[in-house]
Each structure stands twice: as structure tokens, then as C-alpha cells.
Image (spheres, rainbow, N blue to C red):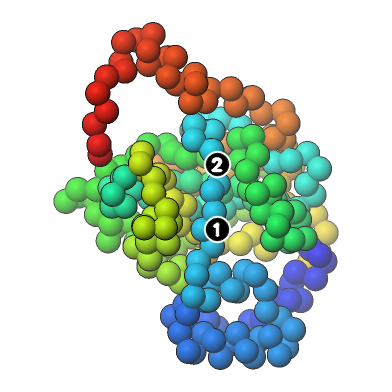
Amino acid sequence: DPTRAEEVREKVGAIVQGHISHLKPGSAEAAEVKRVLQAEGLWSQYLEVGIGPDPEIFTKAPVLSAVGLGADIGVLARSAWNNPEPELVLVVDSRGNPVGATLGNDVNLRDFEGRSALLLTEAKDNNASCAIGPFLRLFDDGFTLADAKATEIALDITGPDGFELHGVNPVSEISRELEDLVSHAFGAHHRYPDGFVLFTGTMFAPTEDRDQPGEGFTHKIGDVVRISSPRLGTLTNVVNTAEDTEDWTFGITALMENLAARSLLGPRTRS
């Protein structure tokens, strides 16, 4: 219920008194905070994955369905409350080792996900709902995993109505270590033989009112979204409906046909 968003934020903030960021997820202290919030009727699925023993890990987009720099990004036409999520994205090899980083937009439908956790896939995985770019930066002596952890990611939105929104996602303030997120996504329980890219989460939630007081932010068609960091570039996309963005037609079959036509299919090398 977007009309209660501000009220609930204030209640939760008053109870945790700003100390929730210092909690170790899954710790005894985190369990006590959970008990207090449950007693107040304020516990939620979002707090569970924030300070509980297990992070939120899910498949955001099928292989080859993400879009890149300059493409339209899509929100469902029937969504009335949605937002961007500016994130650091780790590039992880088939052995579970982070080998590089880039930027990403985990486009989200707040009204769908908020109604039920079972609607997470419909909220997260639609045409052009996953943007990655503008390039992959491989880790080396000049840019390490430690540098990635210290990254601050800026978000700037310019709307066709003249509305502007600015925010920052400080990766260092995310409740879990990046290596912990990787270990929950990859291990004996789940393999990625071709590697994967992992969105690491965001500390930014757009709460600034755009239309009605207390309802916060939602996208309008034509919004220009810029996600940037000095060492990872700027990922720029324009908001459209998922129904009107370019159809995703280039899948695994198309990739194999493309490679075969160029005589590029050969012995597989593991990376």
C-alpha cells in the first residue's frame, strides 16, 4: 500500500533506532531485533532477507535476455508503482570466483512484489527488465574486489515531466559481504557451468514523492535513468513498457546458429 509507505518506514526506523545497519545477518542480535519487530507487527519478507540467515537469491533474467547501454528498459504497463534499483554487478566464473564488475539496473515492480512474495518473478523478470553495462571491468591491480566493495553508485533520473531524482547506493553499507552473496548463489547446491553475473543489492530506495504526497516515486514512460560510478562508467536507459520494448528473440538457439555460421564452434574451454 503506497499510501502507508512513509508511515511504516518511520515506525521501523524508530524501533531499530538506526542500528540495523550494524547488525550481522543471522546473528543472535539480529534474531532479537526480529523478535521485537514481530511483536510490533512490523516484520516483513524484506527484513528477513536483510538481517536473517539467508540472503535473497533468485534468477533475475534468462541467459541473453539482459539489455545494455542505450536500450529501453521495461516495466509492465499494468504496474502503477515501480522503481529502478542501481546495483554493483559481479561477474563470476564457473568456479565461483569473482573476476570483474559492472553496473546494473534491477528494474522492480513494487506493487507486484509488495502484494505477495510469490509474485517476485512477475515483478522482476519481464522484457528488458534487466540492464547491464556499459562494460565489464575485469579485476586487476588497478581495480580489485576490495575496490568494488568501496564503490558508490549514483542514480540520476530525468523525467519527461521535468521531475528529477538523485540518489546513491553505497555498496559498503549493504548488510552482507559480497563473497557471502556469491557463496549462497554458487556452491555444491547450485552450479553455473558458464559462470554468471550477480546483482549484489541496493541501499537506495526512491522515497521522494513524485505525484501524491506520501506515495514516493514511480516511473513514467520516457524517464531517462543513469546509473554511474567513476571507475565503472555510466549505464543509461530509457523507461518504456515491457510490452513495447524490443522483443527478446536472440536466445541459445540463435546464438548457436550464429556461431556455427561463423565457424566458431570448437572444443569447449573452461574458464
- For mark 2, give the secondary structure: loop
Image vertical order of residue 202 relative to residue 101, above or below: below
Q: Residue placed at 70% from the left, 57% from the top?
A: 118
Mark 1 Cα shell of 10 Å, populated few (<14), some (14-19), many (≥20):
some
62 displayed left or right of 142: right
Q: Residue 103, position in %: x, y?
A: 44, 46
Earlier sequence position, callout 2 versus callout 1: 2
Between 151 and 271, the one nearer to me in the picture: 271
* Amino acid marked by disc 2: Ala
Residue 245 point in image, percent of width and height: 66, 28
Please give the count of numbered marks on the rendered protein.
2
Placement of 95 over or under 254, stated as above or below:
below
Q: Identify the residue under disc 2.
A: 61
Which residue in the structure is indicated by mark 1?
Answer: 167
Relative side of 65 to 258, left or right: right
State which quarter of the image contains the C terminus. Answer: top left
Q: Residue at x 63, y 82 (%)?
A: 13
Q: Nearer the viewer, residue 81 or 54?
A: 54
On screen, residue 140 versus residue 220, left or right, reads left
At 39% across and 8% down in the image, what residue appears?
Answer: 261
Disc 2 crowd rating (10 Å Cα; few below 14, some 14-19, many 20+) is: some
- The front one of 211 and 97 is 97
- The x and y percentages for residue 59 are 54, 48
Whether residues under marks 2 and 1 lie with C-beta atoms below 8 angstroms apart, the answer is: no
Quadrant of the snapshot with the N terminus: bottom right
- Amino acid type at circle 1 is Gly
Front-most of residues 112 and 152: 112
Residue 261 in view (yes/no): yes
